[in-house]
Amino acid sequence: MAEKVCAFEDVPVNQALRVVVGGVAIALVKDSAGECHAIGDTCTHGDISLAEGFVEDDTLECWAHGSKFSLETGKPLTLPAYEPVPVFSIEIIDGDIYIDPTVTKVIN
């Protein structure tokens, strides 16, 4: 079941915000185009919060080792990470962001 996370306007542009929904840590990102993305917050290379990383275009870079993850697919675009992070669907209702941590996007 989707839970209200925050207001859309509370998510800064080109930055990540760490939220926990149903016990699942999620990095919530608003890209430069104003689109919000929700991906797993833990880097698959090391136990590092991706929300502390750097947003550039459609990627989120882990601050510790430099792996970049696609905000659309969760796939790592650079080493050392080689496993993807989950990507969650976002609903925006009346200006608020809702995420269901049990439903991930199917990425081919």
Image (cartoon, rainbow, N blue to C red):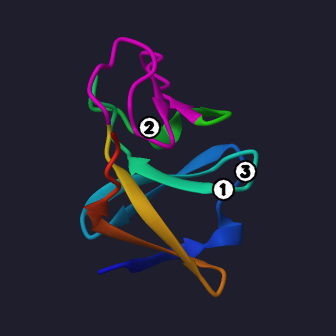
Query: Which residue carries the number 1 mark?
Result: 35
Looking at the image, how many numbered discs can be counted on the residues? 3
Q: Nearer the viewer, residue 29 or 88?
A: 88
Magenta segment boundaries in residue numbering? 59-84
Q: Nearer the viewer, mark 1 or mark 2?
A: 1
Query: Which residue carries the number 2 mark?
Result: 50
Residue that appears at 61% across and 36% down: 58
Q: Position of residue 20 (x, y in %)?
A: 36, 63
Local crowd size for mark 2, using a 10 Å CA cut-off: few (<14), some (14–19), many (≥20): many
What's the CA distance linking mark 2 and mark 3?
16 Å
Q: Label for residue 44?
A: none
Residue that appears at 35% across and 44% down: 107
Indicate the quadrant containing the C terminus: top left, top right, bottom left or bottom right.
top left
Q: Would you say residue 70 sits in the magenta stretch?
A: yes
Residue that appears at 49% across and 43% down: 72
Indicate the quadrant containing the N terminus: top left, top right, bottom left or bottom right.
bottom left
Q: Position of residue 75 (x, y in %)?
A: 38, 31
Q: Above or below — where is 82 with respect to 60?
A: above
Residue that appears at 68% across and 34% down: 57
Residue 10 located left or right of residue 108: right
Q: Secondary structure at mark 3?
A: loop
Q: Position of residue 93 (x, y in %)?
A: 58, 84
Residue 46 located left or right of residue 92: left
